[in-house]
Image (tube, helix red, strand yellow):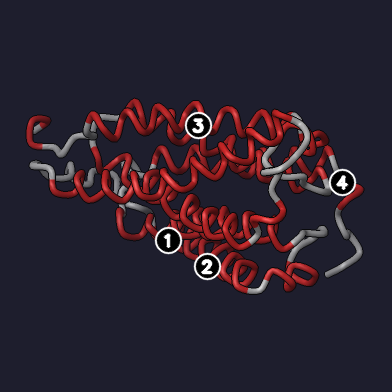
Amino acid sequence: MSGQVRPVSRGTKVLLGVFVALTALATNQLFVLSEHTDAWFAWTIRPPLTAAFLGGGYGAGFLMVLLALRTHAWAHARVPVVTVLIFSTLTLVATLLHRDRFHFGADGAIARFAAWFWLGVYIVVPVALVLLAVRQQRMPGADPERRQPLPVWLAAVLVAQGAVMLVVGVVLFVDPARSATLWPWTLTPLTARVVAAWLVAFGVAALLALVERDLERLEISAVAYTLFGLLELAALARYEDSVRWGSA
């Protein structure tokens, strides 16, 4: 049976390996160095809570691609790859819409390099992912049998969570000014759209669970999804004074 399973291709594994390095770097620059984005990141992010929130997304992404790199079956890596594709595509759009906010002409060499490096990554990654995903689906073999069906109660929870993240993410991306009422702390138009990119990506991933309908295929996404929540709670604990706790 194992010989009939559609495998993760060598090209996909190489790209996932690159993602491991990139997401680890972004996690450090945003989650660890949240208060120093003016000197160490592609654009200045205020308040630091926003940088930490984005860093939490990259931390979850790091674990997700690391686990996907270790799997053999494409069916187990499919949702993580689609998640990264959606996030990277929306982030590229946000970058192009707000390119004036980036450190392309900054005095600091590191900040300037980070801005151009960011742009290069988000131009290349979506295209590479689309090409690899199409190639993966055309590879000979089939998905492994569904051996652990998704429980009805868990499907209902994922639908609810995915719908909330997807709706809020789409609204924030289309109309960043709505963050004043939809988000618990202050966001700029650029950060609202990048936050929205994470929400949409994880929202779609939650809803894709209904398509896969198998706990084994969703194991990687579930672990990353859990870490995402834990890191965001840690970010809130670090910068609780930035949150509008009195606002509904």
Q: How many residues crowd mark 3 within 10 Å: few (<14), some (14–19), many (20+)?
A: many
Residue of label 3: 63
Q: What is the C-alpha distance between the residues marked 1 and 4?
A: 30 Å
Between circles 1 and 3, the one closer to the viewer is 3
Q: Identify the residue shown where x is 48% and y is 58%.
A: 158
Amino acid on which the number 4 mark rests in the picture: Glu
Residue of label 4: 240
161, above or below 137, in the image: below
* Side of 231 relative to 126 (left or right): right
**Disc 1 to disc 2: CB gap under 8 Å:** yes
Q: Identify the residue shown where x is 52% and y is 31%.
A: 22
Could you tell me which secondary element the residue under label 3 belongs to?
A: helix
Q: What is the C-alpha distance between the residues marked 3 and 4?
A: 25 Å
Amino acid on which the number 2 mark rests in the picture: Ala
Residue of label 1: 207
Q: What is the C-alpha distance between the residues marked 4 and 2?
A: 26 Å
